[in-house]
Amino acid sequence: MHLKRKLAVIAGLAPLLIFTLPAATANAHGYVSSPASRQAQCAQGIVACGNIKYEPQSVEGPKGLRSCHANLGQFAELSDDNKGWRVSNVGSSASFTWTFTARHRTANYEYYIGGTRVGFVDGGNVQPPATVTHNINFGGFSGRQKLLAIWNIGDTVNAFYSCVDLNIGGGGGNPPTTTTQPPTTTPPTTTPPPAGGTWAANTAYSVGQTVTYGGSTYRCRQAHTSLPGWEPPNAAALWEKI
Amino acid sequence: MFAQMMIAHLEQGVDMAVVAKAKATRQELRDLAAAVDSTQREELTTLKSWLQTWGKPTTTDHNPNAHAHHGGLPLIDAKVLNDLKDLSGAEFDTTYLNLMTGHQGGAVEMARTEIADGSNPETKAYADRVVQSRQAQVSQMLGLVG
């Protein structure tokens, strides 16, 4: 796919291909997970978002863009500064951690505040390690700032974009990182539900607890916090039907 | 093809979860890893039985570029796993969370591809559960990484 895309770009057919290939061919990818970038906040449920919540790693566009959404219409909300993004308090520098779902050969990483490049890390045009953290100095910027982190890919024309909302000098340690701690929108419940209650997602269940689901009763085999997709009939490893 | 790719992906996830359920410092992370371990083993059994019924092999080419047009195989390899095993304490937790967040994000991508392009209703229903459960895990893990 990447080779195809590259050849298509060379042939000047990119627009045609981009619109005719299914979106599912995307072979991602990465984003800044800490401090939580805008797409990480979507994925975490801190901010209500569209499809970006399923693919925070997919904000991919040609190199050289300066937008939070890589100019992709379906992710435009990432550039909406009034969506209630959580702001991370940081000192005069902070560590930025990338989460990858695929490790492309990397040209470099860039960090921008407005038109100023405050950080540059060479990628050596090799596959990056599985986890990447950069310490970035904000070079005198202070207060509320929107930082754009860019992962420039070595073997495609593309880059991945992540915006992180910062309050520089806002009480964070120096150098470290975040901040205003969660509340996530789906915190695990710490209080055990009453025995025999109906199964619910995002609930902490302990061994031996019983729940009902779809008219049947199940006993918990293994302590876990329940998730959608782990309903008792779909997760016999976690629930025994009784 | 989705089932075969998913098997490779599930096995890599199990490899990491097995390490984390023993080594993670936070109980909630150990519990999550243990639940991922057992649910993904259950999924492996299901997928392998489907492939057997269909008369297809259950293994696939682990070359990460071999299936790029299907969404690509993911990022964990033997070295990454070994490096993870060498870590401990908070550093282990953070690294595991980061790797697993990316890994499960890759599962969401593969499963969404199957929902869009697949034809077997049973497989698509499974893919839908993968999207939901992995997206919820990514959400939880992003919260833990803080």
Image (spheres, coloured by chain):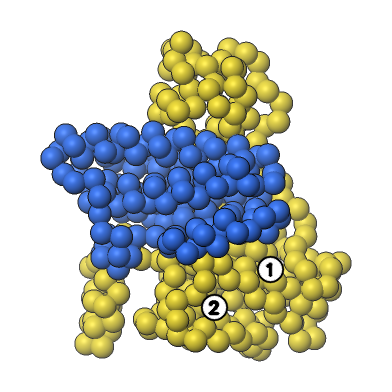
In percent of width and height, residue B2 lies at 27, 49
Judge whether residue A139 can be spotted in this image: yes
**Whole-percent x and y of residue A189?**
67, 32
Residue type at mark 2: give it: Ile
Identified at 62% across, 24% down, the residue is: A206
| In the foreground, B97 or A9 | B97
Task: Give residue A38's position: percent from left, percent from top.
Answer: 60, 63
Chain B as rendered: colour: blue
Q: Which residue is mark 1?
A: A165
Q: Residues within 10 Å of mark 2 (few under 14, many from 20)?
A: many
Q: Which residue is mark 2?
A: A150
SS assignment at label 1: strand
Q: Nearer the viewer, residue A171 or B96?
A: B96
Relative to A226, is A179 above or below? below
Q: Which mark is residue B28?
A: none
Q: CA distance from mark 2 to mark 1?
A: 14 Å
**Mark found first going from the N terminus, 2 or 1:** 2
Q: Amino acid at mark 1?
A: Asp
- Find chain A in the image and tell me its colour: yellow
Judging from the image, mark 2 belongs to the subunit labelled A
For disc 1, the neighbor class at 10 Å (few under 14, some 14 to 19, many from 20) is many
